[in-house]
Image (cartoon, helix red, strand yellow):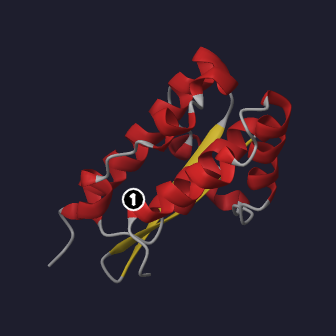
Amino acid sequence: MSNSIDDIQKEVVEEFSMLDGDMEMTINYIMELGEQLPPMSDSSKTDDNIVKGCQSKVWLNADFKDNKIFFEADSNTAITKGLVSILVRILSGRSPKEIVDADLRFIDQMGLNRFIGTQRSNGLGAMMKQIKIYGLAYSTKIN
């Protein structure tokens, strides 16, 4: 994977900038991204994998292979599933250090908060925090 976290964030911001701040198109695009998220296995949809602090149900699971963390996620609402799919796209397949050190600026750069409202912004923050926690947990497993 040659693209850095910053490169992928820029890609995401550019994709959304083409929508010119149109609220309906932005929300629809977020939901489309959620539909493209690979399905999460039912065995991973456990209470342990529910992200605390989200109004919707969001499941986030991490798998550690070859010193990289791979995320799978799902949500019971289309918009939230789209939001978590963006995080998975940006952060999956990275080393724990890259995840812990990631400066996730795409939300502000996109002005995403005005599209998704306070509750979902808080939920998105909770998802990012959970991903960073996985990063910290797995950073201890690198030999």
| Residue that protrudes farthest toward the left in the picture | 143
**Horizontal side, residue 35 vs residue 84: left or right:** right
Q: Residue at x 24, y 53 (%)?
A: 101
Residue 77: x and y, percent? 78, 36
Rendered view: 32 above or below 57: below
Q: Is residue 10 visible?
A: yes
Q: Residue at x 53, y 34 (%)?
A: 124
Residue 5: x and y, percent? 40, 62
Q: Looking at the picture, which amino acid does disc 1 mark? A: Asp
Q: Residue at x 43, y 74 (%)?
A: 3
116 or 110, nearer to the observer: 110
Disc 1 element? helix
Which residue does the numbered mark 1 point to in the structure image?
6
Residue 119: x and y, percent? 60, 18
Rendered view: 25 above or below 95: above
| Residue that protrudes farthest toward the top in the picture | 118
Badge 1 density bin: few <14, some 14–19, many ≥20, Cα 10 Å: some
Residue 2 image-quadrant placement: bottom left
Q: Residue at x 48, y 55 (%)?
A: 9
The number of numbered badges drawn on the structure is 1
**Horizontal side, residue 127 vs residue 134: left or right:** right
Residue 135 image-quadrant placement: bottom left
Residue 142: x and y, percent? 19, 73
Quarter of the picture containing the C terminus is bottom left
Quarter of the picture containing the N terminus is bottom left
**Horizontal side, residue 96 vs residue 80: left or right:** left
**Horizontal side, residue 80 vs residue 10: left or right:** right
Rendered view: 40 above or below 136: below
Q: Is residue 74 visible?
A: no
